[in-house]
Image (cartoon, rainbow, N blue to C red):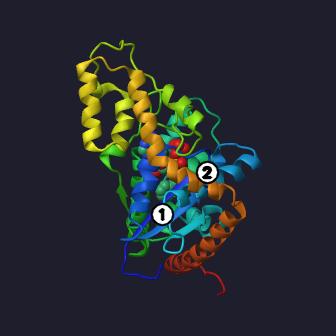
């Protein structure tokens, strides 16, 4: 964590439930794959999780699930920055500064807010301010690259605009972050064909027992074509999810079986299930190991958060200086 010539990659995930394949392919894997080339900042977006209302026990469990998942996915906390958003109060201080510069009209056009409004949800100010807190997460740590799924594209654009606006008013201070959205994994479909999401009941969990995985895979929605009929691999959720996991040859073979007929959706689901077990089974052992050591996870987070705060405080001081605030006495 000392090579300052390396660029920074940063991403966070809301601790709102069990991480799923969409989170893994859209954000965790691309971020963790880069941990040797870049300085990786991977954090628990536990403040962002609060605009959904869960019990204290659930909030705690969701945080552990997320950190245990990061570890099982190969995060090396001695090379990278692993921390909790709630343990770095400077993030909120920057969020306030940014919120005093973003026009209300821009915020009112945010998809996350408009979607919540369209669904008639009970909207709290956390939902409305969400993109500002996210921009602060990114800008406070001078992140160069931010791996996310397609759903976060607008938030990234807003973060870039906030940085540009700040730099324009107060001179070059904030790094303009680049989104990293890979086309093949931008929107991982859920079992119902919609975007896989913790808030919908359509996920395939990154880690689950075999029975649960089977239940989730069997619930993937398909059309009603019978076993003998040829099928369309381009419009099938099973193939879409299998394509993320299988080798090119395996995916080609599945597509050919679809086109030939005599291969049912039940067969395809079993192949997908086996692939999930083979890919994530060994990582699941790690996940379970960490879930049995929650105090160690907590210590890891505290240790990382301490390091992150140190960097955050330096950056916030520079920002306050630029604006003409008195700043902190240290
Ligand atoms: P969720 O929508 O399930 O609550 P999070 O808000 O925790 O997920 O998202 C964490 C990261 O995972 C974000 O970068 C988000 O864009 C990405 N992500 C979530 N769902 C998907 C998906 N279905 N496909 C691709 N990326 C996704
Ligand atoms: N908003 C992201 C999501 O809902 C999570 C998140 C919070 C995030 N802060 C971030 C992602 C900073 C990338 C960078 O998925």
Q: Is residue 131 visible?
A: no
Mark 1 crowd level (few <14, some 14–19, many ≥20, 10 Å Cα): many
Instruction: Residue 201 in the image: state x and y as whole percent.
Output: 57, 31
Is 218 above or below relative to 78?
above
Mark 2 Cα-neighbour bin, 10 Å: few <14, some 14–19, many ≥20: many
- From the top left corner, tell me how far across and down residue 207 is, in percent: 56, 45
Q: Residue at x 69, y 56 (%)?
A: 292
**The quarter of the displayed image where residue 226 is located:** top left
- Image coordinates of residue 5 in percent, x first then y, are 36, 81
- Distance from disc 1 to disc 2, alpha carbons, whole Å, reads 17 Å
Ligand 1 is within 8 Å of the C-beta of the residue at disc 2: yes
260 shown above or below 123: above
Q: Which residue reaches farthest right?
A: 56
Above or below residue 108? Residue 4 is below
Name the mark nearer the viewer: 1 or 2. Answer: 2
Mark 1 CB within 8 Å of ligand 2? yes
Secondary structure beneath label 1: helix
Residue 222, image x, y percentages: 41, 21
Residue that badge 2 annotates: 15
Give the structural element (helix, strand or loop) at label 2.
Answer: loop
Question: What residue is shown with label 1?
Answer: 138
Residue at image location 68% in from the left, 69% down from the top: 299
Name the disc covering residue 306, or none. Answer: none
Q: Which comes sooner in the sequence, label 1 or label 2?
A: 2
Residue nearer the viewer, 52 or 250:
250
In the rendered view, does 201 fall on the left or right side of 185? right
């Amino acid at each position: 964590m000392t090579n300052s010539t390396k660029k920074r990659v940063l991403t966070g995930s809301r601790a709102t439930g069990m991480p799923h394949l969409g989170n893994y392919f859209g954000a965790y894997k691309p971020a963790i794959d880069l941990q040797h080339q870049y300085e990786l900042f991977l954090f628990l977006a536990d403040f962002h999780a609060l605009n959904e209302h869960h019990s204290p026990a659930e909030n705690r469990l969701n945080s552990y699930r997320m950190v245990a998942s990061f570890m099982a996915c190969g995060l090396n906390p001695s090379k990278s920055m692993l921390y909790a958003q709630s343990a770095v109060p400077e993030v909120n201080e920057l969020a306030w500064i940014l919120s005093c510069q973003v026009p209300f009209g821009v915020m009112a056009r945010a998809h996350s807010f408009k979607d919540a409004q369209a669904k008639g949800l009970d909207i709290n100010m956390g939902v409305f301010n969400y993109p500002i807190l996210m921009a602060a997460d990114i800008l406070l740590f001078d992140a160069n690259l931010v791996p996310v799924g397609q759903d976060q594209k607008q938030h990234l654009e807003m973060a870039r605009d906030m940085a540009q606006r700040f730099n324009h008013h107060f001179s070059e201070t904030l790094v303009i972050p680049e989104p990293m959205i890979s086309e093949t994994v931008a929107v991982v479909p859920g079992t119902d064909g919609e975007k896989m999401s913790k808030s919908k009941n359509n996920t395939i969990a990154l880690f689950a027992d075999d029975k649960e995985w089977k239940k989730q895979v069997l619930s993937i929605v398909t059309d009603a074509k019978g076993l003998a009929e040829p099928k369309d691999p381009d419009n099938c959720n099973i193939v879409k999810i299998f394509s993320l996991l299988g080798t090119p040859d395996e995916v080609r073979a599945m597509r050919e079986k679809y086109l030939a007929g005599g291969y049912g959706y039940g067969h395809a689901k079993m192949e997908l299930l086996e692939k999930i077990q083979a890919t994530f089974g060994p990582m699941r052992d790690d996940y379970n190991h960490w879930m049995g050591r929650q105090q160690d996870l907590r210590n890891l987070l505290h240790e990382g958060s301490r390091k992150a705060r140190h960097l955050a405080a330096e950056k916030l001081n520079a920002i306050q200086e630029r604006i003409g605030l008195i700043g902190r006495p240290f």
